[in-house]
Amino acid sequence: MTVTFSMPYYAQGNCQAEASNKVIKAKLSKVIDDNQRSWAEMLSEVLWAFRTSKRTATGTTPYALTFGHDAILSMEVTVKSLRVARQYEITPGQYKDSIMAKLDDLDKERLLALDRVQAQKVKVAKAYNKMVRPKAFAEANLVLKAMLPIRHKDPKFGKWSPTWEGPSVVHQILKVGAYCLRTVDCHVQLTLLNGKYLEKYHPTMWEVAK
């Protein structure tokens, strides 16, 4: 069997494995509060719930995107839902033809799900961009850079730890909002920074007086 490592098919390479594991772990945590060691026993039930629940992004279930129709739940068999009742009225040949027809339409459903995912991403990006204040710097601008990691506190200062350091000089402007900085002594810094971690430097009155 050939193993495909291209990004669309290799879940470990396109972060889909991490995203799915995060959702499954959150669902597991809701059902094993009393006994943490029972997670292996509940995993199959959580996976079934995950595969048969509609995703907001796609508007359908992973099961339906695989087989062309939603899974029949045990409750539907017990109460004899409409689609279960109709299955007793058709012959095995008609049932097979119906399943094959749904499989033929599966590519179309997958493309519609992809369109929904892309539309949601545009919607989320639009909402995010409304809250983002764009920053732009020119070469030779004096800037302050955020103390990374964010909210890191120096033991010497505690809650009074500084959040910005500098000033530094913008040495080079790169693509996608990345900047290369240098110190005021002209030493180029190798670590590139995103513009969101920079602020324009405004000298204080004391520094101006000096």
Image (cartoon, rainbow, N blue to C red):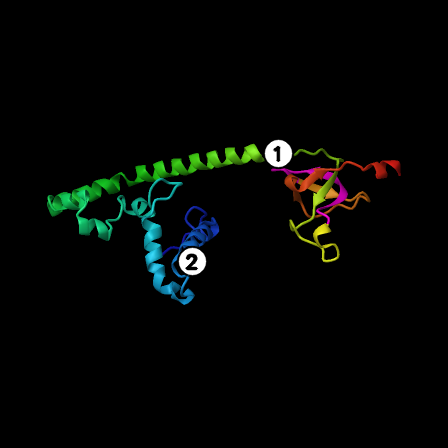
**Where, by quadrant of the figure, is residue 146 drawn?**
top right
State the quadrant of the C terminus.
top right
Nearer the camera: disc 1 or disc 2: 2
Q: Earlier in the sequence, mark 1 or mark 2?
A: 2
Identify which residue is drawn at 33% across, 59% down.
44
Q: Is residue 173 magenta?
A: yes
Q: Which numbered disc covers residue 133?
A: 1
Q: Residues within 10 Å of mark 2 (few under 14, many from 20)?
A: few
Give the residue at mark 2.
29
Label 1: state its secondary structure: loop
Amino acid under label 1?
Arg
Report the magenta residues as a range.
162-178
Q: Position of residue 4 (x, y in %)?
A: 41, 52
Q: Nearer the viewer, residue 21 or 53?
A: 53
Left or right? Give the position of 21 relative to 151: left
Q: Which secondary structure class fits the magenta region best?
A: strand
Left or right? Give the position of 158 relative to 20: right
Q: Is residue 22 above or below residue 122?
A: below
Q: Position of residue 124 (x, y in %)?
A: 48, 36
Q: Is residue 45 magenta?
A: no
Q: Nearer the viewer, residue 44 or 14?
A: 44
**Where, by quadrant of the figure, is residue 137 drawn?**
top right
State the quadrant of the N terminus.
bottom left
Q: Nearer the viewer, residue 193 or 210?
A: 210
Amino acid under label 2?
Ser
Left or right? Give the position of 200 relative to 37: right
- Do tag 1 and tag 2 residues touch (Cβ < 8 Å)? no
Q: Which numbered disc covers residue 95?
A: none
Identify which residue is drawn at 82% across, 44% down.
185
